[in-house]
Image: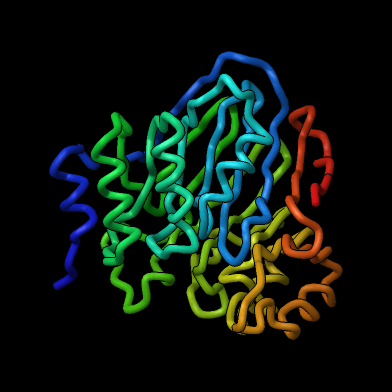
Amino acid sequence: MRNRILSLAFALTFVLCSASLLTINSLRGSNFSITFFNIGHGDAMFIQTPNNGQVLIDGGPSPEVLSKLGERMPFYDNEIELVFISHLHADHITGVVEILRRYSVGTLLVNDYNYDSPVVKQLVDEIGKTNTKVRSFYRGDSVIIDGVEIRSLWPEEGATCENINDCAQVLHVSYGDFDALLTSDVELSRIDIGEEYSYSVDVLKVPHQGNKSSVSQDVVNRMKPVYAIFSVGENNYGHPNEEIVSMLRSFGTNVMRTDEVGDIEFEVKNKYDKPHLSVTK
C-alpha cells in the first residue's frame, strides 16, 4: 500500500481537486515564449503567455531560479499564475520552495506520488504558509491560459511506480502551430505514454538529462522534434549520453544543451508563426 505523506499533508490545509480543465485569462499584451533555464543539473522551464501570464514547470536544484525569473518578469510583478511540480526530486523542487517564499503562486499542479525528503518537508511547510491552491494533474487533464494549452500525457491517475521518475508529469504545451513536449524524468524508451500521442513537435525536452535510456529511436521517429533540449549541468553521470545525442542528430534534430549555450528561449510573436530561437549565456 502506497504511503501518501505529501498528499495527506496537502489535505490538512487544502482541497486537492481535479484539474480536468482549468481556464485562466490574464490581462496584458505580450508574446508567447517558453524558456529552458540554465540552472544546473535539473529542470526549470518558464512560459510567458500572450497576455503576460506566467507558468513555471519545476524550479531546478537551487534558488538560482529566482534570479532567472527576475530577468524575465517586471520587478513589480510578484505573481505566478501556475507552477507545475513534475515530481518530488530535489533537482526539480528546490527552487519551488524559494519561489513560494518570494512570489504569490496561484495554483500548484501536482500528482500525489509520495517521496519523502528534507526538501519535500520544506515544500509542504511553505505551501502551508500561503493561499496557493493545490490541484492534481493527471493524464487527460489540461489547463488553458491565454490560449496556451498545457495537457497531461502522463501519469495516469492511480498508476503505481517503483521509481518516482516513472510517475513524473509529461506535459504537452501547444500554442497555435507550436508544440513542445516536456518530459521531466520519464524515460520514453521504457515508459509508453501512448501511441495516440504520436505527433511531430517543435521542441522535445529530453528526459532525465539525456541518460542512456531517456529516449528511443522509435519515439524520435514518431515525434520528429526540430529541437532537442538537454537541461544539464556539471555531473558525474555522463549526461547527456553521447549515443543519445548522436541518435537525435541522425534524425536531423537540432541538439542544444543549457550548460553550453545558457537559457534557451522559443518565442512565437503571432499565433501561427514559426518560433524564434534565442539564447542567453
In the rendered image, residue 66, in percent from the top left (x then y), is placed at 56, 42
Tally the marks: 0
In the rendered image, residue 209, in percent from the top left (x then y), is placed at 61, 70
Residue 143 position (above or below residue 11):
above
In the rendered image, residue 174, in percent from the top left (x then y), is placed at 63, 42
Identify the colour scheme used. rainbow
Tell me the residue at 57%/58% (across/down): 43
- Say whether residue 176 is left or right of residue 236: right
In the rendered image, residue 155, in percent from the top left (x then y), is placed at 39, 61
Q: Nearer the viewer, residue 200 or 279?
A: 279
- Say whether residue 73 is left or right of residue 140: right
Quadrant of residue 11 within the rendered picture: top left
- Say whether residue 71 is left or right of residue 84: right
Tell me the residue at 71%/80% (across/down): 244
Quadrant of residue 176 within the rendered picture: top right
Quick one: quadrant of the N terminus?
bottom left
- Say whether residue 143 is left or right of residue 146: left
Tell me the residue at 57%/19% (across/down): 76
Tell me the residue at 38%/44% (across/down): 109
Quadrant of residue 278 within the rendered picture: top right
Q: Nearer the viewer, residue 183 or 122?
A: 122
